[in-house]
Image (cartoon, rainbow, N blue to C red):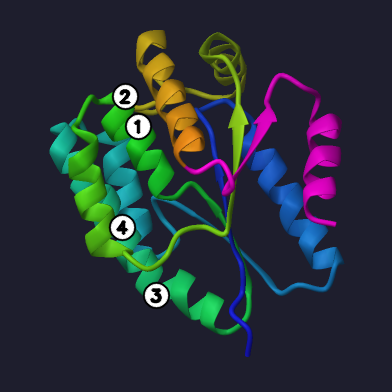
Amino acid sequence: MARGRFITFEGIDGAGKSTQLAFLAEHLRGQGHDVLVTREPGGTPLGETLRALVLKTDMDPRTETLVMFAARAEHLAQVIRPALAAGRWVVCDRFSDATFAYQSGGRLLPGEDVEALERWVHPDLQPDCTLLVDVPPDVAAQRLAAARSADRFEAEQTAFFDRVRAAYLQRVQRDPSRFIVLDGTRTPAQLQQQIAEAFP
C-alpha cells in the first residue's frame, strides 16, 4: 500500500488556519482520500493532557519545548505514523515548524537545540507539504480579541509574535519547495480557491 501524505498547517495565533484546514480536509475527502485531521500539541489522550498544561501553566522555555516534543513523539507513534502507513492522508494543525517558530523564535531558544530534538523524535519524517497562513501580528491580535479569551501564548505581546512570524518565514526560506504561503489578510474564499488549486 502506498504511504499517505502528511500535510501541516502553520501560522501565528489568529491567522485563520483552522478554517482553512477544515476546508482542505473536506476538499481532499471530496477527491476520495481517507483523511485524518489532528493537531499539535494534542492528537492523543496524553498529548491533549500535555496541551492543557502547556497552554495554561507557566514554565521555563526549555521545559515548554520538551513538553512539545514529548507530545509529538506520542502523536507520531500512536496516530501519524500508523495513519500514513495505512495510506491515509494526515492533515495536522501545527508540527515541528511551530516549535521552531514559537520556542526558538518567540522564546529565543537556540535553534540548534530544537533541531537536536527534531532529529531525535522524527529524523526520517517531514511534512510533504506545509501551508503557512501568514498574517501581520496586529491583524491576528484583533481577530483573537473578538473571538475568545487568550491562552498563555495568545496573551503574549506583539514583539513575541513578530519574532514568531519571522521564524516561520525563515523556515520557508530554508525549505521553499515544502511550503505554500497563504496571505492570511485575504478573504477565506480567496484562500480556499488558492488551496483547491494547490491540491487539484
Q: Residues within 10 Å of mark 3 (few under 14, many from 20)?
A: few
Measured in 3D between alpha carbons, the distance from the residue under mark 4 to the one under mark 1, in whole angstroms, is 15 Å
Name the residue that disc number 4 marks. 71
Q: Is residue 194 magenta?
A: yes
Q: Nearer the viewer, mark 4 or mark 1?
A: 1
Distance from label 3 to label 2 (Cα)?
Answer: 29 Å
Q: From the viewer's perspective, is 34 left or right of 91?
A: right
Tell me the CA gap for discs 3 and 4.
Answer: 11 Å
Q: Considering only order in the chain, which callout, 4 or 3, is on the residue closer to the N terminus?
A: 4
**Is residue 105 among the parts visible in the rendering?**
yes
Kindly identify the residue that appears in the image at 67 percent across and 47 percent down: 21
Q: Which numbered disc covers residue 106?
A: 2
Circle 3 — which element? helix
Image: magenta residue range = 175-200
Chain-order first, disc 1 or disc 3: 3
Write down the residue under mark 3.
78
Amino acid at dot 3: Gln
Q: Please name the residue shown 57% across and 14% down the image.
A: 136
Q: Label 1: which residue?
A: 102
Q: Residue 113 in magenta?
A: no
